[in-house]
Image (cartoon, helix red, strand yellow):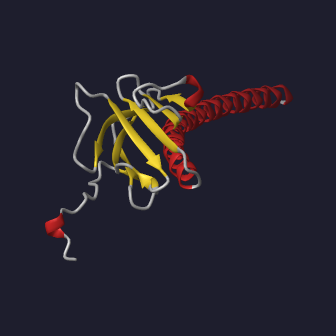
């Protein structure tokens, strides 16, 4: 009788260990799946943040040009090269505006696959096209020579517009391919 109870107790202990082992495996699988989901979400957040960081750095470069020009008698230029996916911030020191001297370059940055230039349109409706892949925004003491927008694409090809306002020097990033304000003709201005 005692032997039978020991055998039942031994079987019960084995069943409890087996059940405990099954629980451990299930918990490990659940934790592994949760970790995988967290990793995927974190990766997506980093990708989105990578776009925002690059776009904000570009907006900051544009704002630096406007602010530096407003506080001095110097002129600055942001050159956007759509083919190369890069931009250059420079101080203009040489009368020949077609030549960029090394000592004029303040900042030169390339975009990666998280952020890309799509096109540029100025407020006089001149736009980049297949033949003209370089756009130049010049800032002087009085403000921007031209206003316009620069359309950026994130890694999912969602458009974002960098708006350059020639009147108030403010440069900002807005989601979507937004319309820009165009200058009024003399006939449209009542005074």
**Horizontal relation, residue 15 to residue 167: left or right:** right
Q: Residue at x 44, y 25 (%)?
A: 99
Indicate left or right for 128 with 80 as reference: left
Please name whichever residue, 170 or 93, is drawn nearer the observer in this view of the structure. 93
- Residue occupying image coordinates x 50% and y 42%: 76
Looking at the image, which residue sits at the far left?
A: 187
Q: Is residue 27 above or below residue 84?
A: below
The image quarter in which residue 168 lies:
bottom left
Q: Residue at left 38%, top 49%?
A: 145
Q: Is residue 60 above or below residue 71?
A: above
Residue nearest the observer in this picture, 152 or 163: 163
Residue 104 can be seen in this image = yes
Q: Is residue 159 visible?
A: no
172 displayed left or right of 39: left
Considering every residue shown, the one lying at the far front of the view is 95
Q: Is residue 190 found left or right of 79 in the rendered image?
A: left
Q: Nearer the viewer, residue 101 or 84?
A: 101
Viewport quadrant of the C terminus: bottom left
Q: Quadrant of residue 143?
A: bottom left
Q: Which residue, as the protein is rendered here, is positioned at the far right?
A: 2
Q: Looking at the picture, how far across and down is residue 157, in whole percent?
A: 33, 36
Residue 55, given in percent of the width and then of the height, sits at: 48, 41
Measured along the vertical axis of the image, is residue 166 above or below residue 155? below
Q: Residue 160: horizontal and vertical position, in percent? A: 37, 45
Query: Could you tell me which quadrant the N terminus lies in?
Result: top right
Could you tell me which residue is drawn at 51 percent across and 37 percent down?
Answer: 54
Closer to the camera in the image, 183 or 119:
183
Place of residue 57 in the rendered image (x, y in percent of width and height, measured from the top left): 54, 41
**Count of marks, rendered view:** 0
């Amino acid at each position: 009788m005692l032997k039978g109870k020991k055998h039942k107790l031994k079987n019960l202990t084995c069943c409890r260990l087996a059940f405990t082992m099954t629980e451990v495996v299930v918990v490990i699988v659940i934790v592994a799946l949760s970790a995988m989901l967290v990793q995927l979400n974190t990766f997506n957040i980093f990708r989105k943040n990578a776009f925002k960081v690059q776009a904000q750095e570009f907006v900051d470069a544009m704002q630096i040009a406007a602010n530096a020009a407003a506080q001095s008698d110097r002129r600055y230029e942001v050159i956007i090269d759509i083919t190369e996916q890069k931009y250059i911030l420079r101080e203009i020191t040489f009368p020949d505006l077609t030549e960029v001297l090394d000592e004029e370059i303040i900042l030169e940055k390339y975009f990666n696959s998280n952020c890309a230039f799509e096109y540029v349109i100025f407020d006089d409706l001149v736009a980049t096209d297949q033949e003209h892949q370089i756009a130049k925004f010049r800032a002087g003491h009085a403000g921007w020579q031209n206003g316009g927008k620069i359309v950026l694409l994130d890694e999912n090809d969602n458009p974002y517009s960098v708006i350059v306002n020639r009147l108030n020097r403010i440069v900002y990033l807005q989601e979507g391919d937004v319309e820009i304000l165009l200058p009024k003709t003399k006939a449209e201005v009542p005074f």
